[in-house]
Image (cartoon, rainbow, N blue to C red):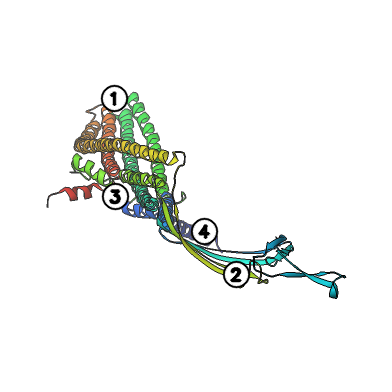
Amino acid sequence: MSTVQMRSVCLLGLILSCLLAGAVSASAAPHPLTLQQCIDIALQKNLFRTASRYSIEIAEAQHRQALSGYWPQIGAKANYAIMDQEPNFIFPSQSISMPSGTSLVMQVTNPAAPGGSVQVPLATLPVPEQNVKLMDRHNFTASLNATLPLYTGGQVGAIVRQSEQGMKAAKEEARRTDLQVVYDTTRYYYGAVLARELVQIGRDALTRMQVTLDLTENLYTKGSGKVKKTDFLRNKTVVEWLRSAVASLEGNEQLAKAALTNSMGLEWQNPVEPAAEPLPFIPSKAELRDLVSGAYRFNPDWARLDAGLAAAEAKIDEAKSGHLPKVGLFGSLTGIVNSYDKGIVTPDNKNSWMVGIGMELPLFNGLRTTGEVREAKARLEKLKQQQFLLKEGIALQVKHIFIQLITAQQQKVSSEAAAASSEENRSLNERAYQEEMVETKDVIEAQLMESLMKAQYQKTLYDNLDARANMDFVVGRQIAEIISTTLPR
């Protein structure tokens, strides 16, 4: 093979390698996701949400345990025992007095009497000691017992009500976790978009500043002398500073994507790429009073405290049941397997059953029940005070976010106008600089001011989105739904 052919083959192989590398890089690149797609993935894979679901299962299991108090309690017992010896009963010796009119004689030996014996009348009958066997040493016993509460003084009902409120609180806690997942994902998603926009602004500024540097160098070396070496050095310093700033912004973008990936419950090796869409501006027309009212209806923390109040009231009823009697039915069925059929294991005793009704009435327990009632009432009053504090806290939090939302919406108009003006100012200064009509510092200032105003505008858009997401999190419902429920029909 000639040298030319070998070079052709090597060149072809290099081209194929580059194409394959490009194909692999393209396939490995993350697929851009929209905000809703990120939220859907987060609600499926976020571990905090998975853990919160177990709290609901625990509360439901506790509710089923409480409901078991209404049902009969049935249990079976069985035991097989081998005793060291057969149990017995010693019947002591005794004398039985004979009733009057009863004739009982005893034959007594007397050689002097005819026949060698005589009959002696007895007033008492002596009974010797007797050893009675009760059962065989091998014994098997099985029993079936059942109890059914008829009246518990309201104790079972109070426990059931507490478990129902516990389920409600667990569901609200899970809903709070869902809201937290949605809020974090939304905030990190828009944070990643903001970081991407800032990186692009920084790169554009660096490109323009580099062009200005080239122009400054050309004017410094070939111009009329108005541009000096100090102008060139100042411009170069700004270029290098911008290059460092862009590197920092790129690092922030990677951190934002990592935070978004973590909030979605994905592995850190596969960072999420937000969709190629700019930050939207979504104005809000909701009134503060409607938002506060909506928070009292939909806020999970408020609903959990409300469930806690209901459970505390049920706890008082449970404590009061300690003063009241308990009435219930009971029954048992017993079977004994023993090889002996005398003593206490006669055929009649081997299989037996029993039913009855019982009552338990507390008379005095050292005022323990009274103390439990006082404790339950004190806990209820404490929760009521916490409810008042939470009510004021929620209203203050909603008002704070509402002010942030209104401020961001007002800043959007002015920052957008400032960004447009700064862009026009930069363009005019660049054209004037080419004709040496303005100084170098004016061009640098105009370019930096444009980048700053554009960055400020993007930050304003992000603040508006973050405030909306935070309001949805605190209220417990999206602002759009609050507005739709308050609009006149």
Measured in 3D between alpha carbons, the distance from the residue under mark 1 to the one under mark 4, in whole angstroms, is 53 Å
Q: Foreground residue, 470 or 148? A: 148
Which residue position holds label 1? Answer: 225
Q: Amino acid at mark 4?
A: Cys
Q: In this picture, is 252 found above or below 29?
A: above
Cβ–Cβ below 8 Å for labels 1 and 2? no
Which residue position holds label 2? Answer: 350
Cβ–Cβ below 8 Å for labels 1 and 4? no
Measured in 3D between alpha carbons, the distance from the residue under mark 1 to the one under mark 2, in whole angstroms, is 126 Å
Foreground label between 4 and 3: 3
The 10 Å Cα crowd at callout 2, few under 14, some 14 to 19, many 20 or more, is: some
Instruction: From the top left corner, tell me how far across and down residue 51 is, in percent.
Output: 44, 51
Measured in 3D between alpha carbons, the distance from the residue under mark 3 to the one under mark 1, in whole angstroms, is 46 Å
Measured in 3D between alpha carbons, the distance from the residue under mark 2 to the one under mark 4, in whole angstroms, is 101 Å
Q: Earlier in the sequence, mark 3 or mark 2?
A: 3
The 10 Å Cα crowd at callout 3, few under 14, some 14 to 19, many 20 or more, is: few
Marker disc for residue 132? none
Q: Amino acid at mark 2?
A: Lys
Marker disc for residue 277? 3
Q: Earlier in the sequence, mark 1 or mark 4?
A: 4
Which residue position holds label 4? Answer: 10
Q: Hey, which quadrant is residue 312 in on the image?
A: top left
